[in-house]
Amino acid sequence: MAKRILKQFGVVLLAVLLCFISVLGRQLTLSASAEEAGNIVEAYEQTNVMDNLKGSTIAGKDFALEDYPHNADGKPQLLSFVEFCYSYYGEKQDDYGLYVYFYNPQDTPIDVTADRNKIQFTFGEKDRYSKYALEFLNYSKQAGYEGRFYKFRIKLSDAQREALLKGIKAESRVYKVSSFELCVQSKITDYPCAQTYTYTGYALGYGSDLAETDSLACKVDGFDDYITLDVNHTVYYKEGDFYHGQQSQLNSCFFRVPNKFFEEYGELTQIAYEWYEYVTNFILVTEDKAVYDAIDGLRGKGLGAVNNGYDYLFCALCDFDSSWFKEKGTMLTLYDGWEMKDEYSWWDGISKVTVKMKEEGEVEEWMKRLSSSIAAAFYTNGINCQDYSVVASDIMEKFKRNSKTLGAPYYGDGYSQSLFCDFVDEGHKRGYNYREISPSDTFEVFWRETTKSLWQRIWGGYSVVTNYDSLPAIIKISASDLNGSDEEIANRLYIHKSDVQKLKSEYSIGQNAEEKETVILFRYGTSTSLSLPCGQAASNASKDRDLELVKTAVTQAAEEDFSAYVTQQTVYLDFDIISLTFTKDNVSTVIPVAMSPMDVFSNTNPPDEITTRGNMLSWWQILLGILGLIAIMILLIKFLPQIVHAIGKAIALPFKAMKKACNTSKEKRRRRKEEKREQVEKYNNDNETESWLDRIENMSEEEIEAAVEEICKELYGE
């Protein structure tokens, strides 16, 4: 084992560190005596990565700079995973830490300002892989090798540190590293490395107090059982509640898994994944170029910044009744969709503002309350907004552009927090989330549809029908799943229609590959989105003219002839699948996944076309309906006597039937009496006895019945 001495001098402190470089595998270690322990961590972290690497042994070979040239096409490599100063003595565990060294062949600066660089590993006998943030320490500054090598500390919380110390065995500490993520030019890329680091022994001063030398050693082994996934995201919307704008948003993804994993390890029984969940501020989609230019120019700032708020007036509709507006004339009820309140649910939390059209002061007050931000605006380029959907990539691009104006703090890949609101659905957690899902898990997805009866169409009002679907979280895609039109497939699998061809392509690639692959559809998140029609007006005329334009636009929008809509959606930032678990013969195997985290935005969904178009009746349709109702009433009056007569006959019919039934019953009783008389007469004739007819001539009906019963008993035993 090679040995070198590194001396560091400071104004106040002189620390002498004895550094040992392991020659076993691709590993670097450091040890020091116990009396130096107080400053050893700080001193080690301050040493430059180049000083640590020089004189070390990497992959069984002495480190040499010429083995690590600049390579424009090269990928970062993990050079070393360092366990620093482990001790089985609790009082000596304060210096314990984990460090990593990277070779950066492209010399492209790694973004080290945020916790976006991570490493994924498990330890001891623990199956679950986890991601840990990497805290930057330094990079190489030698001329010609600037940024070629990087040194990071694995950032551990108190809970993570405690779990590590409890989870590893003192005599053999195992760390199984599957991949690492580095952020370069705002893009995070996951690099598989598949290395198992097994540490034995202890640095001098951290093992037995009687030890006189280091016994620390490390063995590095590779492993093949990891999966690299190419993940495609999709979203599904169904019917929405037009009047409150509520829609259900089901997020899914699909990817190929080599069949060899199913053959060797059994069925897929669990997927572990993580993400950061947020809800966007309003996104505007408009047919009006002037409106678009005004809002887009704000770059996400407040609406009040548009020429004092008077060249542009905007109103989001929520449960708006145009008939009430027409009746009141000079009174307009608006809904300010930007002022969310914690005590209300998302779509119901829209504050109501009453504006008197003739009182300018109240209009100014309304504009002040309306002066919060629209995250992004989009122009339909002449297309009817009710048919226009903004693709997810355009939303992401506009969010990033506006984020440069709004500035920090940021979420994920440089998205300003000012573009998001504080709301999340009930049962969801804003920010970081981790979840493990199995095929037996289901998503209870609700779909709400606004409907109107004929009466409601004429006099106002609506009904909301709620349907529920219980959908499995994980399914294997088969050939039969892809039969039919794109729309049929999308509705069958609950994916976006535009993603059907991509799903078919992934299935074809998997079936035609040399090593067959199975496509997995993974439903990972359900939430609520919002999509509301808007009234809008833009003018350079007087303020009064602006207000009239708003009045007209709102009325048209309430009649579903709108030219803009606003929408909000749930986004999943840094979505990352961590591992897949397979089970065979009751034995589960966790396979780590190498996947670059993705920011998941969804296409916008206009207010539901089924419930908006043709749902409300025009004035002439209502007029025709009233005239028809009058005509029906006239006809009813004309034929009223005949109708009353027919109704009377119908009412009397059951009573006639009852009378007939009673008469039939009496006739039956009379016939039975005659039959009994005949039986008595036959009995007298056969037995030459006194004629009963003479005897019963003066009998009552009850006495005759009793006599007949007596004779029947004698004749028939009854």
Image (cartoon, rainbow, N blue to C red):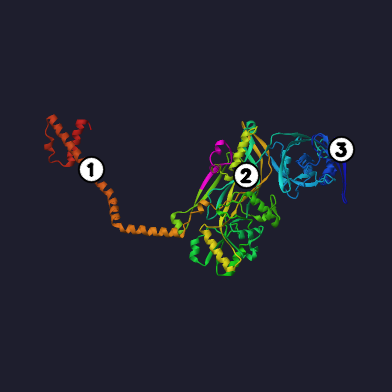
Residue at the spot 74% in from the left edge and 40% down from the top edge? 165
Q: Give the range drawn in magenta.
A: 467-488
Measured from the top left, where is residue 64 in percent x and y? Answer: 84, 38
- Residue 327 percent across, percent down from the top left: 48, 65
- Give the amino acid at mark 2: His
Quadrant in which residue 19 is drawn: top right
Name the quadrant of the C terminus.
top left
| Circle nearer the N terminus (3, 1) | 3
Type of residue at label 3? Lys
Q: Is residue 517 left or right of residue 617?
A: right
- The residue lying toward the viewer, choosing from 681 and 318, is 318
Q: Residue 219: where, in percent of width, then height?
A: 78, 34
Which label sits in the foreground, 2 or 1? 2
Q: Which mark is residue 233?
A: 2
Q: Find the residue positioned furthest to the front.
A: 382
Residue under circle 1?
A: 664
The quarter in which the N terminus is drawn is top right
Looking at the rendered structure, the secondary structure element under dot 3 is: strand
Quarter where residue 701 is shown: top left
Q: Nearer the viewer, mark 2 or mark 3?
A: 2
Element at badge 2?
Answer: strand
* CA distance for labels 2 and 3: 52 Å
Contact between marks 2 and 1 (CB within 8 A): the answer is no
